[in-house]
């Protein structure tokens, strides 16, 4: 009886230790993934906001003249306009 | 009951914990280093740099077409590359292909599931993809024969373990990118249905995705319920950049036309602009009066305007550079769920829970005037007409209230 009790509790302890190892392995693999991701993030090249902003403004300016929602379109160029004849009031 | 602890197991216990501590310490150091680096480059705000840019004038947008036919909430829509066809999907499982010029319905399919949250037009215009609560993305080839049963030719391409939130064809009809409530994005081969690449990294449902403009390479951005926007490399499956400044679910992401930045719309009632080269958020588009979430965002062709569809039934138009609102558009009678610019930038379409889609463009247009045409007719306050002949190549702006050349 004593032996079976001892081996039963040993099995419980073994199971507990196995579970703990699995949990810490999961935690470790998660932590490893996080560190790997952070290493990638740290490695990328960054520019200053002023430079990035200037380039964005430049792009807007370059393409503004052909943006139909910004500058509008001649009626003939707008497919959604109804083509109706002129009405003189 | 006494039991002996196996000394071997004891040492095995200590080892994993030590490594975990080391990893945690390293991740903390890296995070601080990243924050310092990002702070160093934050030398100025976008709207400060944009102070010297001219402000945008008065903005009038007109609804040109209202597409009625859905029996329930419109959840998603996409334009065809021919700039006139639109596919839209709704809560009742219907997917309709419209001709936006004539407002005719060209095709209609009933999906076997409700809440079709995602739909996309193939680049060739010959097929549409859609999916939702069925956890799948199905591709329907569109035939010229209107009587043909589209459902018979349906091809199941993507399989997720939770709802499909967004889908998009890549540059060809051959591959499709999907995002799902199961927290992953995936790239599929349409012909074989094979999974080509999967993208893991979001901690919750992924709600939206957008492919980078083709000039800038094989990346895409996704936004999720974990408040993060991730930029992915499509070939390696790696998350190359991640942004976490929103305070709630990110409902929509859209690349800036140059591909160097992207905007996001979130349930925290803000839209934000993230620059990829500066690796940070560079602008927030918000107002104290806007308290409802933004469901969808899109840029105009030049990237100067950002259109945001909100859950308070309105569409706010933002000046991307200055960070100010230039217009607020009414018309929908329920929340705006989807919004997209047409391929040539002349108009944008919004879909809403009020069962309709609206196609809008600028309210006034530049009118070229030649000596051969009768020009601007002004109606003065004393009700007398005056004719003003104007030589070409003068351009006159005709406003909505002076319309005499048709609506």
Image (spheres, coloured by chain):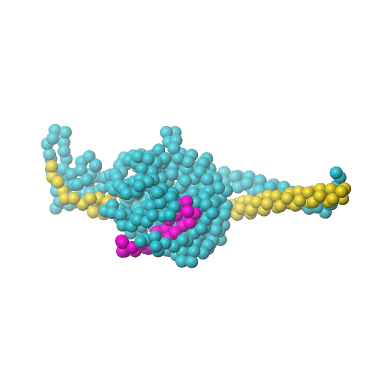
Question: Residue A76's x, y, as percent?
Answer: 23, 54
Question: Residue B185's x, y, as percent?
Answer: 52, 55
- Give the magenta part as a residue range: B124-148
Viewer-side residue, B144 vs B325: B144
Numbered circles on residues, count:
0
Looking at this view, name the residue that lies furthest to the bottom.
B192
Image quadrant in which the C terminus of chain B is located:
top left
Q: Would residue B355 be found to the left or right of residue B36 on screen?
A: left
Looking at this view, name the residue that lies furthest to the right.
A2
Q: Would residue B49 be found to the left or right of residue B9 on screen?
A: left
Q: Would residue B310 be found to the left or right of residue B24 on screen?
A: left
Viewer-side residue, B254 vs B1: B1
* Picture residue at 32% right of the left edge, 52% below the top: B346
* Picture residue at 52% right of the left edge, 45% below the top: B225
Residue B224 visible in the picture: yes
Viewer-side residue, A32 vs B364: A32
Viewer-side residue, B279 vs B345: B345
- In this rendering, the answer to whether A67 lies above or below B140 is above
Residue B85 visible in the picture: no
* Picture residue at 45% right of the left edge, 40% below the top: B293
Question: Residue B92's x, y, as percent?
Answer: 40, 49
Q: Would residue B48 be found to the left or right of residue B357 on screen?
A: right
Chain shown in cyan: B
Residue B137 sits inside the magenta stretch? yes
- In this rendering, the answer to whether B24 lies above or below B83 is above
Q: Colour of chain A?
A: yellow
Question: Residue A59's x, y, as percent?
Answer: 41, 52
- In this rendering, the answer to whether B196 lies above or below B28 is below
* Picture residue at 23% right of the left edge, 50% below the top: A82
Residue B170 sits inside the magenta stretch? no
């Amino acid at each position: 009886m004593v032996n079976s009790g001892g081996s039963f509790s040993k099995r419980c302890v073994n199971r507990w230790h196995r579970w703990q190892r699995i949990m810490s392995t999961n935690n470790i693999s998660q932590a490893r993934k996080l560190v790997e991701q952070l290493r990638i993030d740290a490695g990328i090249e960054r520019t200053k906001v002023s430079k990035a902003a200037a380039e964005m403004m430049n792009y807007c300016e370059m393409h503004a003249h052909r943006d139909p929602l910004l500058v509008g379109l001649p009626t003939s160029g707008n497919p959604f306009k109804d083509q109706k004849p002129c009405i003189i009031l | 009951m006494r039991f002996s602890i196996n000394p071997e197991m004891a040492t095995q216990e200590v080892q994993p914990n030590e490594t975990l501590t080391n990893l945690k310490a390293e991740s903390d150091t890296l995070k601080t280093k990243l924050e310092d680096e990002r702070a160093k480059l934050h030398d100025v705000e976008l709207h400060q740099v944009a102070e010297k840019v001219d402000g945008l004038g008065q903005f009038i947008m007109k609804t040109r077409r209202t597409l009625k036919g859905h029996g329930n909430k419109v959840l998603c829509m996409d334009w065809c590359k021919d700039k006139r066809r639109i596919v839209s999907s709704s809560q009742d499982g219907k997917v309709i292909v419209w001709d936006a010029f004539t407002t005719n319905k060209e095709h209609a399919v009933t999906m076997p599931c409700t809440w079709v949250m995602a739909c996309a037009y193939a680049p060739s215009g010959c097929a549409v993809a859609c999916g939702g609560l069925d956890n799948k993305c199905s591709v329907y080839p569109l035939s010229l024969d209107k009587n043909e049963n589209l459902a018979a030719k349906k091809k199941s391409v993507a399989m997720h373990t939770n709802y499909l939130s967004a889908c998009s064809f890549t540059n060809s009809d051959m591959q499709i990118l999907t995002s799902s409530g199961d927290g992953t994005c995936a790239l599929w081969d349409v012909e074989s249905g094979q999974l080509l690449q999967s993208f893991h990294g979001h901690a919750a449902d992924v709600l939206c995705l957008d492919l980078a403009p083709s000039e800038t390479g094989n990346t895409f951005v996704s936004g999720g319920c974990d408040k993060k926007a991730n930029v992915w490399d499509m070939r390696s499956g790696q998350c190359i950049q991640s942004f976490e400044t929103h305070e709630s679910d990110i409902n929509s992401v859209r690349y800036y036309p140059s591909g160097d930045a992207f905007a996001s719309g979130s349930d925290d009632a803000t839209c934000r602009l993230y620059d990829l080269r500066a690796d940070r958020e560079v602008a927030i588009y918000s107002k104290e009066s806007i308290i409802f979430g933004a469901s969808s965002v899109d840029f105009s062709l030049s990237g100067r305007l950002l259109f945001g569809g909100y859950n308070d039934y309105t569409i706010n138009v933002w000046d991307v550079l200055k960070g100010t609102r230039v217009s607020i558009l009414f018309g929908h009678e329920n929340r705006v769920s989807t919004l997209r610019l047409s391929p040539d930038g002349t108009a944008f379409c919004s879909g809403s829970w009020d069962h309709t889609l609206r196609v809008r463009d600028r309210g006034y247009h530049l009118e070229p005037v030649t000596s051969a045409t009768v020009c601007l007719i002004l109606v003065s306050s004393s009700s007398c007409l005056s004719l003003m002949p104007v030589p070409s190549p003068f351009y006159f702006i005709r406003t909505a209230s002076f319309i005499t050349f048709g609506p």
